[in-house]
Image (spheres, helix red, strand yellow):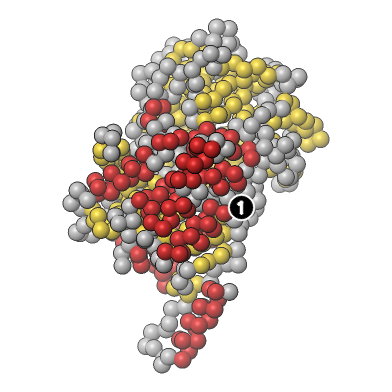
Amino acid sequence: MRYLSLFFATLLAVILLPMPMVAAVTPIIPGNNLVLEGIPPIPSDLVQKVERYTQFRSASISSWHPKQREMLIYTRFGDTRQVHLVKFPLGTRQQLTFFPEPIRGASFQPTNGDYFVFSKDIGGNEFNQNYRYDLNTGETTLLTDGESKNSRGVWSNNGSRMIYTSTRRTGNDADFYIIEPQNPASNKLLTQNEGGGWYGLDFSPDDSKFLALQYVSVNESYLWLIDTSTGEKKRLLPQEGEEKISYDGGLFSKDGKGLYVICDRDSEFSRLAYVSLDSLEHTYLSKQFPWDVTNFDLSNDGNYLAFVTNEDGIGVLHLLNTNTRRFKPLPKLPVGQIYGVRWHNNNRELGFTLISAKYTADAYSLNINNNKVERWTLSETGGLNSSNFSDAELVRWKSFDGRTISGFLYRPATKFTGKRPVIINIHGGPESQFRPSFLGRYNYYLNELGVAILFPNVRGSTGYGKTFTKLDNGLRREDSVKDIGALLNWIATQPELDPERILVTGGSYGGYMSLAVATKYSDKIKAAIDIVGISNFVTFLENTKGYRRDLRRVEYGDERNPKMREFLQKISPVNNAENIKVPLFVIHGKNDPRVPLIEAEQIVKTVRKNNVPVWYLMAKDEGHGFRKKKNIDFQFYATLMFIKEFLLN
């Protein structure tokens, strides 16, 4: 009502004024799904100016057809990402699913490919449900209970069954269920688990065993073997008494005698290893690369392992012959990120998704017999020549304790001269890492506004060794905030950057960081934007969904411990909000299961007492970040208005 009153008042003012020489620009009207407070009307001419930067698309490989040289991909032609079929490189993208909600994963039945299973939620609540899509009829069939949170699941080798996790028993614990997708009535509980950090990995070659992962924290996880008939489970790794080890991913060898896993056992970085199931001895296959292995896949015949290393933020593809343990030379790929490596059943073609600073994500394949790389999708970029977009520049600075912190700086177009304003964008997680990628709408800030964007990887980020990842745990939480304080000082030493015009933003944990920086360094920044961020660690831990709560306590601390509760209250931005002296923009989704809406509501209410501008945008049909194009676009318009008013003046 507040927005509509302002809208009609604007119209009345236009009517009463003398007729201008140029027609008045009317504001756009947001959808009823959006709640706005403090945000001024957004003129339609702004929408027209930025339109090309909102029209880019991306595409990702989802699944190879088991018999045909075809693949399922995700891409968006309407408001949300849906499943499409592509029958050959750069072929027509045939849309198969049509839902108002985006699809979260799809995979072909692995022997015949006459149907696939996909997942989706409602309004970003992350309570994913699984569905079967029959290619012959186009019909979808619900496979889960329609209420609980479910993983999409892992296919058996014979293609008759899937094992997936579901919280339906308690609402919090991720138990394993087994189902024949062609017979939904076959669905049954396989084994009960405690906690929400359970994930399925792989069936043994004879489908009698199932490999599962129990995630406790970024530095601690366990591998289990489960009998697919009885549900009996046995912890495999690490063994009793061993140090905490992180296992991330695992596949059975073709002969079933061992496992290929990613782990940080006896190493700062996560390495690819072969583990004998008899002796549990680890043989490291990527030890010559002093970087994390991020994802991998084994060819259907078991002869080749394809894996990706994260080398100072850049994804590098490698191919290992499992028989000779020798690496096969590969063609040079564009500098960027490589995700979702997947072998076709023909054992010669590897599919993957590639994204770079200059090009949005697309699906590719590599033929290992002739090293031919083929692009399967060519996603549009709104008519913009993305080859002219800025590349990421690796920068480093010293923090308060002498430790070197790094980040990636995107400089604005060369047509802009003089000291440039800066947006510092802090990633979430906190166990995450910013890696150079396509910036999408952010390219407008670089190309049209002349704003530099800097993405720091503060302590606690992954990719720099497990010691670095632990540096912000528990009582050291604010040391990562001090890393941004040191960055603000570093910016002041750079001749091309303007220390008088800095805006800090971030999503999720990055939202907390933005708020924390605003409480400690309001004298050094011009404004802050908090996107689905934590404003009070205690209320966050008490209200995040039960299946996540214990996992988050490992990272942030247990609020039930009086000493830790006192510390968490002390550092929470909402309890230091009187120090926020700069304009603040808070963005959140009503259905966020990770960082509940109360985190946004309480910081907005508190900071308004400071008599500084506070903008608030809430989407009723979104969760942990906006996923629908119309909502993402409106967030962009409002953010652009905020930047122009409070950063660029």
Residue 182, compared with residue 589, is above or below; it is above
Determine the residue positioned at 42% across, 30% down.
470
Q: Report the residue marked by disc 1.
A: 591
Residue 449, compared with residue 359, is above or below; it is below
For the residue pair 58 and 24, the one nearer the viewer reads as 24
Residue 113: image location, x then y, percent: 66, 34
Question: Does residue 11 appear left or right of residue 124 in this picture?
Answer: left
Residue 27, compared with residue 523, is above or below; it is below
The quarter of the image holding the C terminus is bottom left
Question: Does residue 589 appear left or right of residue 491 in this picture?
Answer: right
Residue 322: image location, x then y, percent: 48, 15
For the residue pair 558 and 132, the one nearer the viewer reads as 558
Residue 572: image location, x then y, percent: 46, 48
Determine the residue positioned at 50% across, 37% down.
564
Question: Which image quarter: residue 332?
Answer: top left
Question: Does residue 465 appear left or right of residue 89 in this picture?
Answer: left
Q: Residues within 10 Å of mark 1 (few under 14, many from 20)?
A: many
For the residue pair 43 and 512, the one nearer the viewer reads as 512
